Image: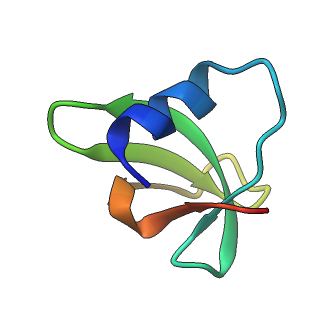
């Protein structure tokens, strides 16, 4: 995914499913478009956050 799409998902009022590395479900918490990274919550634990390159994120069909 690109940074602009990650930002659109983050700002959307819709519930859009996103996966990290095609495996774990994540919630996008913040997107740094110029640097191409996003802070995501992995799974349901709000304490489990990671900053990852947006290319590792994939929108689920």
Looking at the rendering, in which quadrant would you find the C terminus?
Answer: bottom right
Q: Is residue 53 visible?
A: no
Q: Where does the image place residue 50, in percent across and percent down from the top left?
A: 43, 57
Q: Quadrant of residue 56?
A: bottom left
Q: How is the image coloured?
A: rainbow
43 lies left or right of 54: right
Q: With respect to residue 9, does 28 lie above or below? A: below
Looking at the rendering, in which quadrant would you find the N terminus?
Answer: bottom left
| Residue located at (57% from left, 41% from top) | 28
49 lies left or right of 56: right
Q: Where does the image place residue 19, in percent across and percent down from the top left?
A: 64, 65
| Residue located at (67% from left, 74% from top) | 24
Q: Is residue 15 visible?
A: yes
Q: Quadrant of residue 13?
A: top right
9 lies left or right of 15: left
View extreme (front): residue? 61
Count of marks placed on residues: 0
| Residue located at (52% from left, 48% from top) | 40
| Residue located at (51% from left, 77% from top) | 21
Q: Quadrant of residue 31?
A: top left
Q: Where does the image place residue 2, in percent across and percent down from the top left?
A: 36, 48
């Amino acid at each position: 995914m690109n940074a602009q799409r990650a930002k659109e998902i983050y700002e959307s009022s819709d519930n859009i499913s996103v996966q990290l590395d095609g495996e774990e479900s994540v919630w996008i918490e913040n997107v740094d478009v110029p640097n191409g990274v996003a802070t995501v919550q992995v799974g349901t634990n709000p304490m489990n956050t990671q900053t990852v390159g947006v290319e590792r994120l994939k929108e689920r069909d």
